[in-house]
Image (cartoon, grey):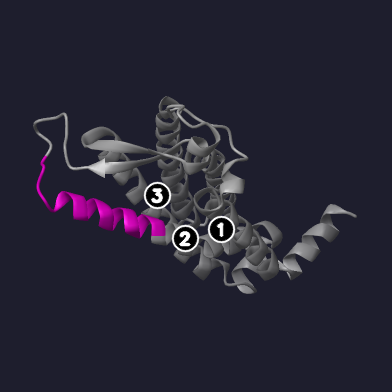
Amino acid sequence: MSTASVRERAKARATEITVLLTLVGYGAVGGVFLVPEFQALFPTLTQETVNLLAHAIAAVNTVTVITLSLGWYWIRNDEVKKHAAAMTTSFGLILLFLGMYLPKVAGGGTKEFVLDSAYAWVPLWDPVYPAYLIMLAIHIVLSVVSVPVVLYAIVLGLTHTERELRNETPHRRVGRIAASAWILSLVLGVVTYLLLNHLYDSTFAAAEAATVLLPGVPV
């Protein structure tokens, strides 16, 4: 089957492909939180490794904000090829993020915010924790609801020509929504990372799969 034939088939089924990829993404992320059998597929990680992955994820997300912003800037200046390269790079970075996030949560665990700090200049006001929770909640909600929109924009972009994207698809409108939600979600994710990992203290909650498979082993 030729590449052109595959592209035509994918073009005709852009919505179905988006739904399938969305379900796969939701299933993978949901599985690391809710399905012990899926969690058990990942290796057990130490807390030091979890911290290292958290730093790497924050770095990847920061770079993704930059590439998304550049993609937005370039398309507004009608630099289509640069825009396409930036958005494709951003999608690749999100896949890299998932490649680190899934084992981090399933095989290691998560941190929980503590309103305390090693730095005297960091405010310990009561509203700080609710503000952190609000930002985290918005980040999570946007991450969840933006998945099908982002995937649809990506699938359209990969399967249609520039002329088709401009005249025959909702790519421009969908892409604007996707990029806005995606950027805001990533920015809030990086901000909450800084609060949790650098400015304030935290407690570590080991993944259930890790503690069940290797009881007594610190993670």
**Residue 117 position in % (x across, y down):** 17, 34
SS at badge 1: helix
- Asked if the stretch drawn in magenta spans residue 2, the answer is no
In the rendering, which numbered label is found on residue 144? Answer: 2
- Tell me the quarter of the picture where residue 152 sits: bottom right
Please, what is the three-letter code of the amino acid marked with disc 3?
Leu
Q: Give the magenta part as a residue range.
A: 123-140
- Residue 151 versus residue 168: which sits nearer the camera? 151
- Asked if the stretch drawn in magenta spans residue 124, the answer is yes
Q: Calculate the distance from the C-alpha at mark 1 to the C-alpha at mark 2.
A: 8 Å
Name the front one of labels 1 and 3.
1
The relative height of residue 32 versus residue 160 in the rendered view (above or below) is: above
Left or right of residue 211: residue 135: left
Q: Residues within 10 Å of mark 2 (few under 14, many from 20)?
A: some
The relative height of residue 116 versus residue 146 in the rendered view (above or below) is: above
Quarter the C terminus occupies: top left
Q: Is the magenta stretch mostly helix, strand or loop?
A: helix
SS at badge 3: helix
**Residue 76 position in % (x across, y down):** 46, 58
**Residue 215 position in % (x across, y down):** 49, 32
Q: Are the two marked residues, 1 and 3, in contact with CB atoms closer than 8 angstroms?
A: no
**Residue 151 position in % (x across, y down):** 58, 60
Q: How crowded is mark 1: few (under 14 residues within 10 Å), some or many (20 or more)?
A: some
